[in-house]
Image: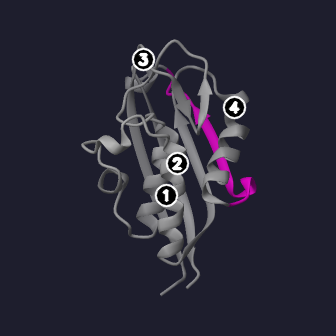
Amino acid sequence: MTPLRIGHGYDVHRLTQGRKLILGGVEIPYERGLLGHSDADVLTHAVMDALTGAARLGDIGQLFPDTDPTYEGASSLGLLAQVGRLLAEAGYAVVNIDATLIAQAPKVGPYKQQMSQNLARALGISAEQVNVKATTEERLGFTGDGSGMAAHAVVLVERIK
């Protein structure tokens, strides 16, 4: 069996009033934020699910259920760090992460480098191993009409033990 494994993650959250918008661990000025049990960081959630999938560790709903008050308002970067520890315990190391945020607004270009650095820091890897992109859906669907945001992530991990 090859020591390399690929994982894909996808997450979506509704935009709502009265919440901060946190993406890749960066608080972005915007009139609405994402609704969720934790900080609802859709980008970080997609990365976590990709990593847990690649290492066959289940998914974030199993690891951090929204029925557990422990995770209410939790920092997704903190949860990502926990996923990184589980990955290492299972004998895997991150080779690279490629993540895409899908949102009509706000524009996140100025924040992408910080998002990459935050994700990398939480996992104890180099920012050179993390790529964050963003796109709109040309005003189509729930992301295009501004009612929510989505993210995809693809990761490559390597078995090291």
Label 2 Cα crowd, 10 Å radius (few <14 / some 14-19 / many 20+)? few
Magenta region, residue range: 125-138
Residue 91 lies, in percent from the top left, at 52, 78
First in sequence: mark 3 vs mark 2? 2
In the image shown, does 160 or 121 lie closer to the viewer?
121
Say which element carries label 4: helix
Residue 19 lies, in percent from the top left, at 45, 20
Instruction: Work out whether 157 lies above or below 43.
Output: below
Which residue, as the protein is rendered here, is positioned at the far left? 67
Q: Residue at x 63, y 22 (%)?
A: 107
Q: Amino acid at mark 2?
A: Gly
Whether pointer 3 and pointer 4 mark residues with C-beta atoms closer than 8 Å, the reply is: no
Whether pointer 2 and pointer 1 mark residues with C-beta atoms closer than 8 Å, the reply is: yes
Label 1 Cα crowd, 10 Å radius (few <14 / some 14-19 / many 20+)? some
First in sequence: mark 1 vs mark 4? 1
Label disc, if present, on residue 111 of the rendered structure: 4
Q: CA distance from mark 2 to mark 1?
A: 7 Å
First in sequence: mark 3 vs mark 1? 1
Q: Which residue is mark 2?
A: 78
Q: Residue at x 46, y 38 (%)?
A: 42
